[in-house]
Image (cartoon, rainbow, N blue to C red):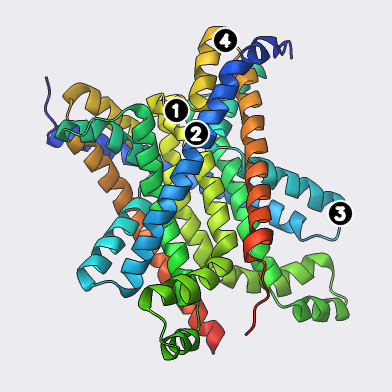
C-alpha cells in the first residue's frame, strides 16, 4: 500500500468542521424538540382522538415509516416548490427531520401510553382530575419513563440520519465535509475525521440523555 | 422537454430491480455478520464480547451515509477498484450486521436462563448447546423484528443514489432532471418504496402479534 495519509489539510479546515458540527447539533436538537411535540399530539390523536384524526395519523405514520428519509427530503426540497412552497435547504432539512421523527416517535409514545394500567387512569378520574391533568401527570409521565430507551435511541438515529441532508447542501457536518473534500482531494481522510466526530456526538448525546433520565425520571415505580 | 409519462415511470420501475438486488445482498451479508456479532456478544470469552461491542458501537454510532463514503472512497486508497453496487453492498452489510447483531443478541438473551443451565447440566458442547437448545428458541423470537428490519434495509439502499448507483431514487433524480416535474417523479418514487416496504411492515406486525399471543398462553 503506497497511499500516504495526510490529515493536515483536513485539520487545517477545523473552523469549517466546527461550524458544520454546530449546524448538525442545532438541526438535531430543534428537530428533536419539534418532532416530540408533533408526536405527543399524534399519539393523543391516535389513542383518544376522533376517528378521522385517527385515520389521518395512521396514514401519516405508515407513509413516513415505509419510505426512505432521502426521498422525503427530496419531496420537501424539490417537489413542494412546484406547488409554491419554497424553502431554504436548512428549513427543508429541518421540516423533513421533524416529519420523520414525528412518525417514529408517535408509535413509541403510543406504546407507552397503552402500557399505563387502566386502574391508574380510573383512580385519577375518581379523584376528579381534569382530562388534561390525567394525560399530563398520570399517563404521559409514566409512559415517558417506560419508553425512554426507545425514544432516546430514536433521537440518536435522527442525528445520524441527518447526514443525508448534505445532499441538498444544508451546511451540516457532512456537506461541509464534501466541500473540504473537493478543495483538498483528501476524501478518505475527511470522511474518517467526520465519522469520528459523529461517533463522539452520538456518544455525547446518549450520555446526556442518560443524565437527563437520572435527573428527572429516575423515581421508584410503585406497582 | 420530456413530460413524465409511462416510459419515464417504467424507467424508475425497472430500477426497482436494483433496489431489490441491493437489499438482498445487504440482508444476506448483514445476516452473516449479524450472527457472528450476536454469538460474540453472548459468548463467554471477554475479548470476543469487547470486539463485537466495539464493532456495534462504531457502526451504530456513525451515519450510514458516511460508512458508504468511507467504503467508496476508501477502497481506491487500498488499491481496489470498486463499483458503486459493491461499495453500497459492503457498507449496507456492515451496517445491518451491527443492527441485526444487536437485535439477535437481545433474542438470544431472551431465551430463559434455565435452558442454558439445563444444556450445561447435560454437558452439551457449546456447538450443540447453541444449535439444539438456544438458537432455535431465539430464532422464533427473532423473526418479527428481523422482518421489520428488512424495511430499514430497503430504505437504506436509497443512499446508494448519492454515490451514483442507479436504483429507484437515482432513477427518480435522472427523470426529474429531464422532466422538471418533481411532484410527480418523487411522488412515484415514494410510492414505489411504499409498495416494497408496506407489505413487509404489515407482515412483521402480524408475526409480532402472533408471537405475543403464543407468549401469553
In the picture, measured across the screen, residue B120 lies left or right of residue B98, that is right
Query: Which numbered disc, 1 or 4, marks the residue that appears first in the sequence?
Result: 1
Instruction: Write down the chain letter for disc 4.
Output: A
Split into 4 quadrants, where in the image is the N terminus of chain A?
top right
Residue under label 2, please give it. A163
Q: As displayed, is residue A178 above or below residue A164?
A: above
How many other residues sit within 10 Å of disc 1, few (<14), some (14-19) or many (≥20)?
Answer: many
Tell me the distance, in whole angstroms, between the alpha carbons under discs 1 and 3: 39 Å
Q: Which one is nearer the viewer's eye here, B34 or A136?
A: A136
Query: Which numbered disc, 2 or 4, marks the residue that appears first in the sequence?
Result: 2
In the image, residue B214 lies at what x, y percent?
Answer: 52, 83
Q: Which one is nearer the viewer's eye here, A25 or B108?
A: A25
**Of the two numbered discs 2 and 4 in the rendering, the one whose residue sits closer to the viewer:** 2
Tell me the distance, in whole angstroms, between the alpha carbons under discs 1 and 2: 6 Å
Instruction: Write down the chain letter for disc 1.
Output: A
Q: As displayed, is residue B22 above or below residue A146?
A: above
Instruction: Write down the chain letter for disc 2.
Output: A
Tell me the distance, in whole angstroms, between the alpha carbons under discs 3 and 2: 34 Å
Residue under label 4, please give it. A185
In the image, residue B145 lies at what x, y percent?
Answer: 52, 63
Amino acid at each position: 500500500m503506497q497511499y500516504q495519509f495526510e490529515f493536515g489539510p483536513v485539520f487545517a479546515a477545523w473552523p469549517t468542521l466546527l461550524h458544520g458540527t454546530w449546524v448538525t447539533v442545532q438541526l438535531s436538537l430543534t428537530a428533536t424538540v419539534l418532532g416530540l411535540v408533533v408526536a405527543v399530539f399524534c399519539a393523543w390523536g391516535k389513542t383518544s382522538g376522533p376517528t378521522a384524526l385517527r385515520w389521518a395519523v395512521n396514514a401519516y405514520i405508515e407513509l413516513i415509516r415505509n419510505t426512505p428519509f432521502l426521498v422525503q427530503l427530496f419531496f420537501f426540497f424539490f417537489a413542494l416548490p412546484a406547488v409554491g412552497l419554497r424553502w431554504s435547504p436548512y428549513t427543508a432539512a429541518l421540516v423533513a427531520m421533524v416529519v420523520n421523527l414525528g412518525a417514529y416517535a408517535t408509535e413509541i409514545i403510543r406504546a407507552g401510553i397503552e402500557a399505563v394500567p387502566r386502574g391508574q387512569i380510573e383512580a385519577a378520574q375518581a379523584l376528579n382530575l381534569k382530562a388534561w391533568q390525567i394525560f399530563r401527570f398520570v399517563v404521559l409521565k409514566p409512559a415517558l419513563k417506560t419508553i425512554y430507551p426507545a425514544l432516546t435511541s430514536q433521537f440518536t438515529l435522527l442525528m445520524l440520519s441527518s447526514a443525508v441532508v448534505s445532499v441538498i447542501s444544508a451546511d451540516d457536518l457532512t456537506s461541509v465535509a464534501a466541500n473540504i473534500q473537493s478543495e483538498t482531494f483528501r476524501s478518505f481522510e475527511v470522511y474518517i475525521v467526520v465519522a469520528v466526530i459523529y461517533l463522539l456526538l452520538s456518544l455525547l448525546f446518549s450520555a446526556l440523555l442518560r443524565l437527563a433520565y437520572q435527573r428527572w425520571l429516575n423515581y421508584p415505580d410503585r406497582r | 422537454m420530456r413530460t413524465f409519462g409511462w416510459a419515464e415511470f417504467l424507467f424508475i420501475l425497472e430500477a426497482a430491480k436494483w433496489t431489490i438486488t441491493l437489499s438482498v445482498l445487504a440482508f444476506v451479508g448483514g445476516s452473516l455478520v449479524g450472527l457472528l456479532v450476536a454469538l460474540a456478544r453472548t459468548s463467554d470469552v471477554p475479548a470476543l464480547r469487547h470486539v463485537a461491542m466495539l464493532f456495534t458501537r462504531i457502526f451504530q454510532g456513525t451515519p450510514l451515509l458516511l460508512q458508504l463514503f468511507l467504503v467508496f472512497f476508501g477502497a481506491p486508497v487500498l488499491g481496489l477498484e470498486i463499483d458503486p453496487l459493491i461499495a453500497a453492498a459492503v457498507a449496507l452489510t456492515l451496517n445491518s450486521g451491527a443492527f441485526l447483531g444487536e437485535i439477535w443478541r437481545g433474542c438470544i438473551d431472551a431465551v430463559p436462563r434455565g435452558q442454558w443451565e439445563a444444556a450445561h447440566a447435560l454437558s452439551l458442547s457449546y456447538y450443540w448447546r447453541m444449535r439444539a437448545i438456544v438458537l432455535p428458541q431465539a430464532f422464533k423470537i427473532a423473526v418479527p423484528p428481523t422482518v421489520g428490519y428488512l424495511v430499514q434495509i430497503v430504505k437504506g439502499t436509497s443512499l446508494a443514489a448519492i454515490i451514483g448507483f442507479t436504483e429507484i431514487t437515482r432513477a427518480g433524480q435522472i427523470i426529474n432532471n429531464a422532466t422538471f416535474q418533481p411532484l410527480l417523479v418523487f411522488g412515484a418514487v415514494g410510492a414505489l418504496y411504499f409498495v416494497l416496504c408496506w407489505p413487509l411492515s404489515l407482515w412483521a406486525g402480524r408475526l409480532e402479534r402472533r408471537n405475543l399471543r403464543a407468549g401469553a398462553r
